[in-house]
Amino acid sequence: MPKSLLLLMIALVPLALAAQQESAAEHGIHVLVATFGDAWNRHDAHAFAATFAEDADFTNVIGMGAHGRSAIEEFHAPMFSTRFKDTHQTATDIKIRMLSPTIASVDVHWEMTGALEVDGSTIPLRKGLLNLVVTEQSGRWLITVMHNQEFTPRKNL
């Protein structure tokens, strides 16, 4: 084997390993987004909150927020038994930007059906965007910061 070919192969090994690591990280983030969606669709505030880091920050579409996993669970529990009890949320597009091997910025475009307005009327198809900062902690990807945005025109929040 020519020496130049051997050197090229040796040079490419770190790149191949980095690509595998990124793929594993992206897979873990996709699992996180799927787990998040599954918990939402089961209207399970505890499982939903478990997708967040212990010290996470959450902000909803109208700017209300919660800090910490237990506060996020407490925030969502009443919503899952009232306005969001019949909702179904789907991630329609996920974009991941790795900032480091253990930190990523993630955009999740979503659609939701089954939500109710404050007055009890049905909200048509909702569309929005979750902006997430996710971190790998003890081999598991968790949401550290979440900002939710909605693109659906609404009559009253």
Image (tube, rainbow, N blue to C red):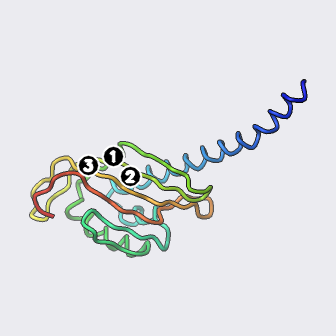
Q: In this view, does 133 lie to the left or right of 8?
A: left
Q: What element carries label 2?
A: helix
Q: What residue type is labelled 3?
A: Lys
Query: Are discs 1 and 2 less than 8 Å apart at CB?
Result: yes
In the picture of the structure, the residue carrying the numbered disc 2 is 37
What is the CA distance from the residue labelled 1 to the residue labelled 2? Answer: 7 Å
Mark in the foreground, 3 or 1: 3
In the picture of the structure, the residue carrying the numbered disc 1 is 90
Q: Which amino acid does label 1 sit on?
A: Thr
Residue 103, given in percent of the width and then of the height, sits at 56, 59
What is the CA distance from the residue labelled 3 to the residue labelled 1? Answer: 10 Å
* Quadrant position of the C terminus in the picture: bottom left
Local crowd size for mark 3, using a 10 Å CA cut-off: few (<14), some (14–19), many (≥20): some
- The label on residue 100 is none
Name the residue at 62% across, 55% down.
101
Whichever of callouts 3 and 1 sits on the residue coming sooner in the sequence is: 1
Give the image quarter of residue 79. Answer: bottom left
Whichever of callouts 1 and 2 sits on the residue coming sooner in the sequence is: 2
Q: What element carries label 3?
A: strand
Residue 122, given in percent of the width and then of the height, sits at 12, 53
Q: Nearer the viewer, residue 33 or 46?
A: 33
10 is higher (above) or lower (below) than 53: above
Q: What residue type is labelled 2?
A: Gly
59 is higher (above) or lower (below) than 25: below
Residue 50, given in percent of the width and then of the height, sits at 46, 65
In the picture of the structure, the residue carrying the numbered disc 3 is 127
Name the residue at 39% across, 52% down.
38
Give the image quarter of residue 39. Answer: bottom left
What is the CA distance from the residue labelled 3 to the residue labelled 2? Answer: 14 Å
Whichever of callouts 3 and 2 sits on the residue coming sooner in the sequence is: 2
* Quadrant position of the N terminus in the picture: top right
